Every structure is written in C-alpha cells, then in structure tokens.
Amino acid sequence: MIVEEFIGEMIPYIVGLLEATGVIVIIIASIKSVVKFIKCNFNFYKSENIRIELSMGLALALEFKLGAEILKTVIVRTLDEFLILAAVTILRIIISFVIHWEVKSMEKSEEKGH
C-alpha cells in the first residue's frame, strides 16, 4: 500500500518532467531548423535536410509526450478521464506514425536524388 501511494504521488512529477522534456525538444529542434533555414537564405529547395531534422525532433518529442500519457493511465480514476487519455494517446500515436513515415519517404527520395 505504501508503494502504491508513493507511485501515485510521484507519477505527476514524472509526467511533468517527460512533458517538459518533449516541449524542450520541440523548442530546440525548431530553433535549429529556423537558424539553418535562415543560413540557406530561405531556399526551399535546399531545405529537405532541415525538414527531416525538424520532423525527427518532433517525433522524438512525441515519444516523450506519449510516455507521459502512458504513465497517466496509472492514476486515472474515472472512465471519462480514461477515454480522454485514450483519445489523446491514439492521436499522438497516429501523428508519430505519420511523422516517421514522412521522414522515411524524404530520406528515400533524398537517396534517389544523389
């Protein structure tokens, strides 16, 4: 019982840490991409690598956020909370899948171009 209470009290802090890490990853990936885009003189044709790096950063951030969502399932108390959490988790999984698919297709097209 003591372990369950401890875990119940620690989960919100761990979830907050994971979500904050995801936000930090998004901020850093975005700043790096903007700087590289500016260095390319806003040339859209040279920005494929920038898109890949930004997409990979977003995918990593989503993994942290998804980990937080999974941990939240431990402290869900009502069916309504669970349904909302499940919907958010499913959306994040779909978005993550789409980003991974886009990165792979961009990498394949880049390999064909060289």
Image: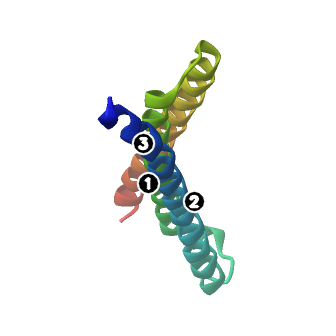
Q: Which mark identifies residue 113?
A: none
Classify 10 Å Cα crowding around label 1: few (below 14), some (14-19), many (20 and above).
some
Instruction: Work out whether residue 40 or residue 96 is closer to the camera in this orientation and state it.
Output: 96
Amino acid carrying label 3: it is: Gly
Classify 10 Å Cα crowding around label 2: few (below 14), some (14-19), many (20 and above).
some
Amino acid carrying label 1: it is: Leu
Which residue does the image show at 53% across and 52% down from the upper left?
Answer: 16
Which residue does the image show at 44% across and 50% down from the upper left?
Answer: 14
The disc, 2 or 3, on the residue closer to the chain's N-terminal end is 2
Image location (x, y in percent) of residue 101: 44, 41
- Badge 2 marks a residue whose secondary structure is helix
> Is label 1 in contact with label 3 (beta carbons under 8 Å)?
no
Which residue does the image show at 53% across and 68% down from the upper left?
Answer: 29
Question: Seen in the image, is 112 located left or right of residue 23?
Answer: left
**Which residue is under mark 1?**
60
Mark 1, mark 2: which one is toward the viewer? 2
Mark 1, mark 3: which one is toward the viewer? 3
Image location (x, y in percent) of residue 72: 49, 34
Q: Which mark identifies residue 23?
A: 2
Amino acid carrying label 2: it is: Val
The disc, 1 or 3, on the residue closer to the chain's N-terminal end is 1
Classify 10 Å Cα crowding around label 3: few (below 14), some (14-19), many (20 and above).
some
The Cα–Cα distance between marks 2 and 3, rounded to whole angstroms, is: 13 Å
Image location (x, y in percent) of residue 11: 45, 43
**Which residue is under mark 3?**
67
Image location (x, y in percent) of residue 111: 34, 58
Rendered position, 86 above or below 109: above
Rendered position, 103 above or below 29: above
Of all residues shown, which one is farthest toward the top? 79
